[in-house]
Amino acid sequence: MQRRVEVALVPVIEYQRLAGITIVPDVCIGSRGKVRSVVLVTRASDLKEVRKVALDESSRTSAALVKIIYREFLGVEPQWSSAVPDISEMLKENDAALIIGDPAMTFKRQGLQVHDLASLWREYSGFGFVFAMWMISDHASQLVRGIDFTAVRDEGLSRIAEIVEYYQPRLGLERSELENYLLQNITFHMEADMRAGLELYWRLAHKHGLIRRVKPLDDS
């Protein structure tokens, strides 16, 4: 986030790489368990059998999370590469593919094993996981600083039906799937469990050389 950007929704790994920013408190995009939109896809059921992983080139926080899961919890170090989010192409020369966002919810799953990353994180760490948060530049205007982000979040949650109505024909998913995703799979609240998971993620990212330091969470 350059200085000309006053506020943005940013992958949480970037908080540790950017200077001059503050996190908006109590608002996030995360999951307490199964997230559905961030998955590692394999042909084999045993993750330890994976030797080559293609990482969705649009991922940053999730790519670091996959590496942490392998290094910290599985004790295996696959070969990593970056790729466009196309499952068929990614799995041509790789044993696994990390894919996020809409493509992660809409690809054909026949013959594939789908490992939900937030579920894996919960299984190994015991915590929920935060993928992104709103961050404000230290040079932001008073107008931006005056935004009530919790009120904006709550207004969005009150309009889930409209959001589902808009995205359902574009994604080709059932209305119930989208409703469950927005109301059950995703959480927009930064609760104690989510905060603890985020701080652990940063510590492990530092331990495994993915960030240079661990900057304390400043969401005051």
Image: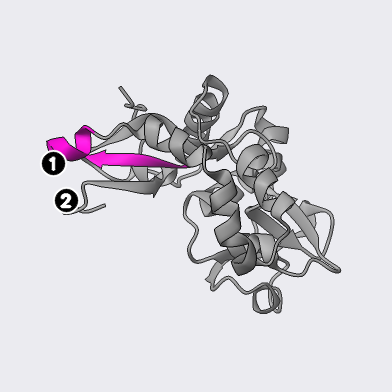
| Magenta part of the chain | 132-146
The local crowd at label 1, few if under 14, some if 14 to 19, many if 20 or more residues have their Cα within 10 Å, is: some
Q: Amino acid at mark 2?
A: Arg
Q: Is residue 65 left or right of residue 75?
A: left
Residue 103 drawn in magenta:
no
Q: Amino acid at mark 1?
A: His
Looking at marks 2 and 1 on the same chain, the residue that comes earlier in the sequence is marked by 2
Residue 138 drawn in magenta:
yes
Q: Are marks 2 and 1 in contact (CB under 8 Å)?
A: yes
Say how many tags the image has.
2
- Compared with residue 139, is residue 41 higher up or lower down, i.e. above or below? below
Q: CA distance from mark 2 to mark 1?
A: 7 Å
Viewer-proximal residue, 220 or 149?
Answer: 149
What colour scheme governs how the chains and residues are painted in the rendered image of this protein?
A: one colour
Q: Position of residue 48 (x, y in %)?
A: 77, 52
**Residue drawn 54% across the image and 51% down it:** 162
Q: Quadrant of residue 90?
A: bottom right
Label 1 residue SS: loop
The local crowd at label 2, few if under 14, some if 14 to 19, many if 20 or more residues have their Cα within 10 Å, is: few
**Residue drawn 47% across the image and 41% down it:** 156
Viewer-proximal residue, 102 or 69?
Answer: 102
**Residue drawn 49% across the image and 66% down it:** 57
Question: Pointer 1: what residue?
Answer: 139
Question: Pointer 2: what residue?
Answer: 3
Q: Position of residue 32 (x, y in %)?
A: 63, 33
Q: Quadrant of residue 111?
A: bottom right
Q: Is residue 197 left or right of residue 43?
A: left
Residue 72 seen in this snapshot = no
The quadrant the C terminus occupies is top left
- Compared with residue 123, is residue 181 higher up or lower down, i.e. above or below? below
Viewer-proximal residue, 107 or 145?
Answer: 145
